[in-house]
Amino acid sequence: MKKFFALLPMLAVAVGLSVGAHANSGQVDKKDPYKMIQQVAEITFKRFADEQTQIRKDPNLLKSIVREELMPYINYKYAAGKVIGKHFAKTSKKDRAEFVPAFKEYLVTSYAQVFTLYNKQKVEFEPGRPLGKKKIVAVNTQVIEPGRDPIDISFKVRKSRKTNEWKAFDMVAEGVSLLDSKQAELSSLIRQKGLPYVTQMLKEKSQRNIVFKSEQG
């Protein structure tokens, strides 16, 4: 767990773009996971750059950017189900329905806070590969920063049976899974205190303001 959080700054830039890259203003290609990851990254970070002045005045604007530019391409429902995991049978449909949007907003706040650490590091994207009949693929990237070894970041992306579109559901930094970490963090709480308790906890965490490191006390 500690190893994962030590890598969070790298996760911030893993969906970033190489310095000097230009965002594709066209529609994101959700039928190709490799193109999708790069296009979403470029669009998102171009918006970060364009709105930097406003973001510095109101860091919570990062939540809006994450919610609008990233979340449409993240399968948070699938990820939420994986977090509930073995406790599924002991939870009600109502409780699960309330957990999913709370988990989504928790991810929004978590990503937004991490993105305050982005500092124009270079990111190299893996070229596309033949997909065949695969339903889940890993899109690999490397974060390049002078004076440091490259950091390997992999996005796990899943194809929808209904729409045939791809969405990311996990990020793996140097072998450490974001989804596995969240599952380990929340599973014991779900078991001990129940899903409604965890849902309320995530709602409260989601309300936290985004703060740049230089502004923290």
Image (tube, rainbow, N blue to C red):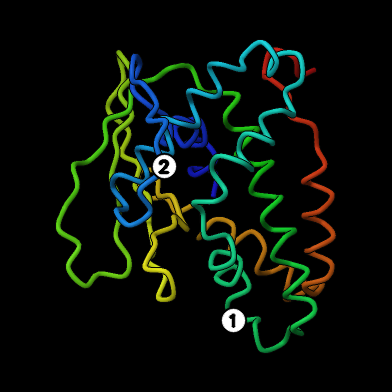
Query: In this view, which residue lies farthest toward the front?
Result: 26
* Quadrant into which the C terminus falls: top right
Instruction: Give the image location of residue 74, x and y in percent.
Output: 51, 54
Residue under label 2: 27
Residue type, numbered disc 1: Lys
Look at mark 1 in the image and give the residue it sits on. Answer: 86
**Secondary element at tag 2:** loop
- Residue ID at (65%, 41%): 110
Label 1 Cα crowd, 10 Å radius (few <14 / some 14-19 / many 20+): few
Where is residue 199 shown, x and y percent of the image? 79, 63
Q: Residue at x 78, y 64 (%)?
A: 198
SS type, badge 1: helix
The tag earlier along the polypeptide, 1 or 2, is 2
Residue 215: where, in percent of width, then height?
Answer: 75, 14
Compared across the picture, whether 46 is left or right of 108 comes to left
192 is higher (above) or lower (below) than 136: below
Whether residue 28 sits left or right of residue 105 in the image: it is left
Q: Local crowd at mark 2 within 10 Å, few (<14), some, or many (≥20)?
A: few
